Amino acid sequence: MNRNGVRVPVLLGAALVTTVLGFLVAMVVTRDGTLLQRPPWVAMLLLVVMGGLVVWIARPVRAHLRSGRRTSVDALRAARTVVLAQAAALTGAAATGWYLGQLLVLLTDLSLVANRERLLSFALALLASVLLSVAGMVAQAWCRIDEDDEERPGIDDDA
């Protein structure tokens, strides 16, 4: 990653690649009439919970950067938080593409009642994936140190 972190075009690229993969895999699976398995609700819940945890973990770094005072946030914790946020954004983008690809396969044959019944599950999984990616980008933005901020006393570099 560059100094500015993960950018939206990188996320869109990851989502595009996994959309193509998800679409191709779903086409192979459904080619002989097999139905796509609904995404498990636990997977959707896990994506949302991970997004919430990433934002929650980034809050102290954000508070520290906003306050401008020395607090209990050390440089290693801040760096780990940024890496976690970037990983969440990329994971969310990849999952978004995966579920979008499968959703597109379902949309190609809505004459099948079973495919119509699966639309909501895949749409919710897609939404949960997008939420994880957004949470990662928000957390990354909260941990950003602007160029002019580098001059002022900040994160404890001694730790």
Image (tube, helix red, strand yellow):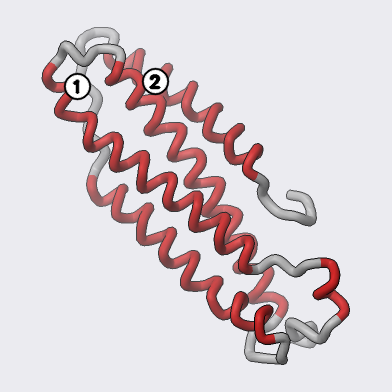
Residue under the image location 36 percent in, 48 percent down: 128
* Label 2: how many Cα within 10 Å (few below 14, some 14–19, many 20+): some
Relative placement, left or right, of 153 versus 84 is right
Q: Are marks 1 and 2 in contact (CB under 8 Å)?
A: no
From the top left corner, tell me how far across and down residue 123 is, in percent. Answer: 30, 36
Q: Is residue 17 left or right of residue 146?
A: left
| Displayed quadrant of residue 26 | top left
Look at 74% across and 82% down and name the residue there. Answer: 155
Callout 2: SS: helix
Residue at x 54%, y 50% (from the top left corner):
89
Question: What residue is pinned by disc 2?
Answer: 25
- Left or right of 33, for residue 99: right
Q: CA distance from mark 1 to mark 2?
A: 16 Å
Q: Residues within 10 Å of mark 1 (few under 14, many from 20)?
A: some
Q: Quadrant of residue 116?
A: top left
Q: Amino acid at mark 1?
A: Asn
Residue 81's place in the image compared with 41, above or below, is: below
Give the residue at x 15% y 28%: 117
Q: As drawn, which residue projects farthest toward the top?
A: 32
Up the image or down, 36 lies above or below 66; here it is: above
Q: Which residue is denoted by mark 1 in the rendering?
A: 115
Task: Say which of 104 and 29 sits in front.
Answer: 104
